[in-house]
Image (cartoon, rainbow, N blue to C red):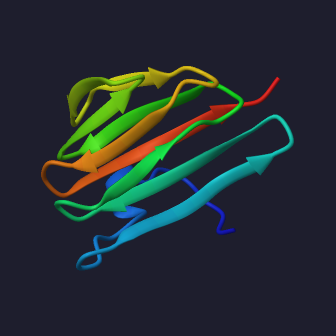
């Protein structure tokens, strides 16, 4: 895990890779994680659940995030919370980057 010193642009910490999902963990602790993701257009994560709340902050582009069957379109600068134990999935509408913050109890 790399160390971030001084000021960094969050979008400079991950790069898009053709037809891929790229992730970079910034913080990994017993009580939670902070992970950056970069998705090329059309890429995504299939429906799944997690036993803890997760906050998504979109930092570039646009994504469709489905939570318990309801679609939400979120774009750069917006956030959404995926509640614990609720099924969720996401798909890149355009190339997009996000920061995922998961908090464990």
The number of numbered discs placed on residues in the rendered structure image is 0
Q: Position of residue 3 (x, y in %)?
A: 66, 63
On the rendered structure, is 88 left or right of 85? left
Q: Position of residue 69 (x, y in %)?
A: 34, 24
Does residue 71 appear in this view?
yes
26 versus 98 height, above or below: below
On the rendered structure, is 84 left or right of 98? right
Residue farthest to the bottom, as pictured:
18
Does residue 9 appear in this view?
no
Residue visible at 54% across and 24% down in the picture: 86
Q: Nearer the viewer, residue 61 or 68?
A: 68
Residue visible at 28% across and 71% down in the picture: 16
53 versus 90 height, above or below: above
Q: Position of residue 78 (x, y in %)?
A: 28, 26
Residue farthest to the right, as pictured:
30
Residue farthest to the left, as pictured:
94
In which quarter of the view is residue 8 placed?
bottom left
On the rendered structure, is 35 left or right of 58? right
Q: Position of residue 82 (x, y in %)?
A: 49, 25
On the rendered structure, is 66 left or right of 71? right
Q: Nearer the viewer, residue 51 or 68?
A: 68
Which quarter of the rendering shows the N terminus? bottom right
Which quarter of the rendering shows the C terminus? top right
Q: Nearer the viewer, residue 19 or 30?
A: 19
In which quarter of the view is residue 12 placed?
bottom left
Residue visible at 50% across and 31% down in the picture: 87
């Amino acid at each position: 895990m790399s160390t971030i010193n001084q000021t960094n642009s969050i979008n400079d910490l991950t790069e898009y890779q053709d037809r891929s999902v790229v992730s970079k963990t910034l913080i990994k602790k017993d009580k939670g994680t902070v992970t950056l993701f970069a998705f090329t257009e059309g890429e995504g994560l299939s429906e799944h659940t997690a036993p803890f709340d997760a906050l998504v902050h979109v930092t570039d582009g646009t994504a469709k995030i489905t939570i318990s069957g309801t679609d939400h379109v979120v774009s750069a600068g917006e956030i959404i919370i995926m509640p614990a134990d609720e099924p969720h999935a996401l798909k890149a509408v355009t190339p997009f980057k996000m920061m995922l913050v998961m908090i464990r109890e």
